[in-house]
Image (spheres, rainbow, N blue to C red):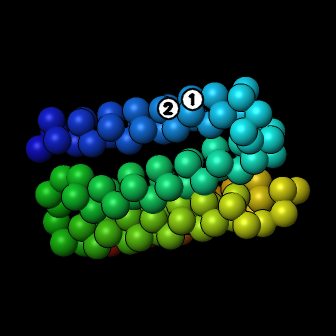
Amino acid sequence: MASKQFWYGLSIGAALLLGAIAVRFMETLHLLTQVGAERWLGVLIGLGLALYANFIPKAAPNPANWQSTLRFGGWAFCIAGLGYACLWALAPKGLAFPMATALVAIATAAVLIRVAVCTWRTN
C-alpha cells in the first residue's frame, strides 16, 4: 500500500510540474497571456488538490472515528480544490487569488476542527 501511495503522489506531482511547464511554454510562444497563464496554473493547482484529496480517505486503515475524519477531510479538500479551480477559471483576476485562498483556508480550518474533535473523543 505504501508503494501505491508513493506512486500516486509522485504521479500527481509530475502531472502538476508538466502542466506548469506546458503553460509557461505556451506563454513564451504567446499562445497565452500572462493573465491566462496565471489562471491555468491556478486551475492546475486546484485540480491537483482535488485529485490528492480523493486519496486521503484511503491513506491507511484506521479506527472508525478516524476513518470518518479522513473521509471528511477528503471531501472538504476535494470541494475546496474544485472551487479553487473554478475561481481561477471564472472569477475576476483581482478576486481569484484571495477568494481561492480563503476557500482552501476554510476547508483546512474545518478539517483541523474535525481532527481536534476526533482526538478529544478518543482520549
Q: Give the Cα separation between the discs numbered 1 and 2.
A: 6 Å
Of 84 and 67, the residue lying toward us:
84
Q: Which residue occupies 78% across, 66% down? A: 91
What residue occupies the far right of the structure in this picture? 94
User: In the image, 98: left or right of 59?
Assistant: right
Q: Which residue occupies 27% across, 42% down? A: 8
Of 24 and 65, the residue lying toward us:
24
Q: Find residue 77 and report its horizontal and vertical position in percent.
A: 48, 62
Position of the C terminus, as image quadrant, is: bottom left
- The residue indicated by pointer 2 is 17
Of 111 and 120, the residue lying toward us:
111
- Residue type (three-letter) at the residue carrying disc 2: Leu
Q: Which residue occupies 17% across, 60% down? A: 62
- The residue indicated by pointer 1 is 21
Helix, strand or loop at mark 1: helix
Helix, strand or loop at mark 2: helix
Q: Find residue 99 and report its horizontal and vertical position in percent.
A: 75, 63
Mark 1 burial class by Cα count in 10 Å: few <14, some 14-19, many 20+: few
Mark 1 touches mark 2? (CB < 8 Å): yes
Q: Closer to the observer: label 1 or label 2? A: 1
User: Taking 110 as reference, is 105 above or below it?
Assistant: above
Which of the 4 image quadrants contains residue 37? top right
Q: Find residue 17 and report its horizontal and vertical position in percent.
A: 49, 32
Q: Find residue 59 and report its horizontal and vertical position in percent.
A: 23, 52
User: In the image, 89: left or right of 1?
Assistant: right
Which of the 4 image quadrants contains residue 61? bottom left
User: In the image, 65: left or right of 107?
Assistant: left
Q: Is residue 116 visible?
A: no
Q: How many marks?
A: 2
- Residue type (three-letter) at the residue carrying disc 1: Ile
Q: Is residue 5 visible?
A: yes
